[in-house]
């Protein structure tokens, strides 16, 4: 094949026109995170503009890594998807480290969250409950009490990128037969906040939603917290009239370990609404505790109880749902193992699910079957790529599955721990914008 002609060679050799930095910054601000990440590789100058602290708050961000708990001396080995790179605090007590999966340039976030105010009562520890678009929700629990079974002393919401935080008082929940446990979620959508017309000082407020469950794990009460108001509210009216009571004799079981996702200003949860045939709805709950809608989840042609929900998340602006299915006859073998199915909600308004990917457990785990939450958990779907992140509990590995290449890569060794209910690796997406809801206010920290 003939090479390029003289004119083409001359054009290739000619210097590229110089684009002013201001114009590049404006252009970068219009790009999605995955495109912006590729543009960093064009030149050192472009990389410098993208990572410059003066500009980066204007740019879209994506998954940078995970905040991982470290127990004692364990969990010191780590790796990135491309090469090892994770920071480990020097302290020997239980703390956290940042596992870098994106090539994020230093400085890395303070994964130990040392900027949080220390409790003024001994025996309290901070447990991560949820994270959303750069904000992290923690419960300040007493001793080794699980914060879903025992009322925390308070809650904290923080931004590791800016070292800003907010104190949230306890919700007033007292465990009883009708309210045995409490599940608390963070409702925050940075992209939606960016589109709001409010001035920066009034943007980036957050909400908390707390669902209180009875002895049958059915939702019996909903309470909410708004950072703009600084107070908890009992949403009994919204709960009764917002759809929960109408679902098959009032049963509404939030499936444990299946995550949550925010879309269109509402928190989406996997909910079993009849208590007999398995989870069958993705329920959207708004900041006032009212049910906006219930989206039927996809079902396969399998017998009852031969499938279960695994995870719900958001990727590339669409909700994703991960489920596990058994073979039609129910008998497992090398030829007929358990499989994971990944669905995408292609049309939100119509509730149309499209099957995106199918993978067998031997490809994922080297086994024909694994028990959900005991042997494996899903901790994230990549917000801008076709990756699913798991924890393998039997060897304490954080692994990533590439759906495009059908490859499994070990991301990090998590070290000791791993009991059911322990804090799992928390996905972290940087948020460099200032938040009106994070005031660094410490009033009320004293525990009586």
Image (cartoon, rainbow, N blue to C red):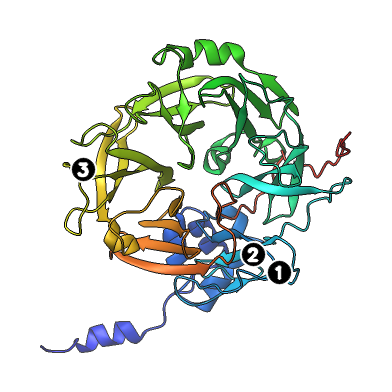
Q: Secondary structure at mark 2?
A: strand
Q: Earlier in the sequence, mark 3 or mark 1?
A: 1
Image quarter where the C terminus lies is top right
Residue 42 percent across, percent down from the top left: 44, 74
CB-based contact (under 8 Å), mark 3 and mark 1: no
Residue 427's image quarter? Answer: bottom right
What residue would you read off at disc 3?
A: 330
Asked if 445 appears above or below 238 in the picture, the reply is: below
Viewer-side label of 3, 1: 3
Q: Are marks 1 and 2 in contact (CB under 8 Å)?
A: yes
> Taking 97 as reference, is 222 above or below it?
above
380 displayed left or right of 229 = left
Q: Is residue 239 visible?
A: yes
Question: In the rendered structure, which disc, 1 or 2, sits on the residue that comes first in sequence?
Answer: 1
Q: Which residue is mark 1?
A: 89
Give left or right: position of 352 versus 70: left
Secondary element type, mark 1: loop
- The residue carrying mark 2 is 97
């Amino acid at each position: 094949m003939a090479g390029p002609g003289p004119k083409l060679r001359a054009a290739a050799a000619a210097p590229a026109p110089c684009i002013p930095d201001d114009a590049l910054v404006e252009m970068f601000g219009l790009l999605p995170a995955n495109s912006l990440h590729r543009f960093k590789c064009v030149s050192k100058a472009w990389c410098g503009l993208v990572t410059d602290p003066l500009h980066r708050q204007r740019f879209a961000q994506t998954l940078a890594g995970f905040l991982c708990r470290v127990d004692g001396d364990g969990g010191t080995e780590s790796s990135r998807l491309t090469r090892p790179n994770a920071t480990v605090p020097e302290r020997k007590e239980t703390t956290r480290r940042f596992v870098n999966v994106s090539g994020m340039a230093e400085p890395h976030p303070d994964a130990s969250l040392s900027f949080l105010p220390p409790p003024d009562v001994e025996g309290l520890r901070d447990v991560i409950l949820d994270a959303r678009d750069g904000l992290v929700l923690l419960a300040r629990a007493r001793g080794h009490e699980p914060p879903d079974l025992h009322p925390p002393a308070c809650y904290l919401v923080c931004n590791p990128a800016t070292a800003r935080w907010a104190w949230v008082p306890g919700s007033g929940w007292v465990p009883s037969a009708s309210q045995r446990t409490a599940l608390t979620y963070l409702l925050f959508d940075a992209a939606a906040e960016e589109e709001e017309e409010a001035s920066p000082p009034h943007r980036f407020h957050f909400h908390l939603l707390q669902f209180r469950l009875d002895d049958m794990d059915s939702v019996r009460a909903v309470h909410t917290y708004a950072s703009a108001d600084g107070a908890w509210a009992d949403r009994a009216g919204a709960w009764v009239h917002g759809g929960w009571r109408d679902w098959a004799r009032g049963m509404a079981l939030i499936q444990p370990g299946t995550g949550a996702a925010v879309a269109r200003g509402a928190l989406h949860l996997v909910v079993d609404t009849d208590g007999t045939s398995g989870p069958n709805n993705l329920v959207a709950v708004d900041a006032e505790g009212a049910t906006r809608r219930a989206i039927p989840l996809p079902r396969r042609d399998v017998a009852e109880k031969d499938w279960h929900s695994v995870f719900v998340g958001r990727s590339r602006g669409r909700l994703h749902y991960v489920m596990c299915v058994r073979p039609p006859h129910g008998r497992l073998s090398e030829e007929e193992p358990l499989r994971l199915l990944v669905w995408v909600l292609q049309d939100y308004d119509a509730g149309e699910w499209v099957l995106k990917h199918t993978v067998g457990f031997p490809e994922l785990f080297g086994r024909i079957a694994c028990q959900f939450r005991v042997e494996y958990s899903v901790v994230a779907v990549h917000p801008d790529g076709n990756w699913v992140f798991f924890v393998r509990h039997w060897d304490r590995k954080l692994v990533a599955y590439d759906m495009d290449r059908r490859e499994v890569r070990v991301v990090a060794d998590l070290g000791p721990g791993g009991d059911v209910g322990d804090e799992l690796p928390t996905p972290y997406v940087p948020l460099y914008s200032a938040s009106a809801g994070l005031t660094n206010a410490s009033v009320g920290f004293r525990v009586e």
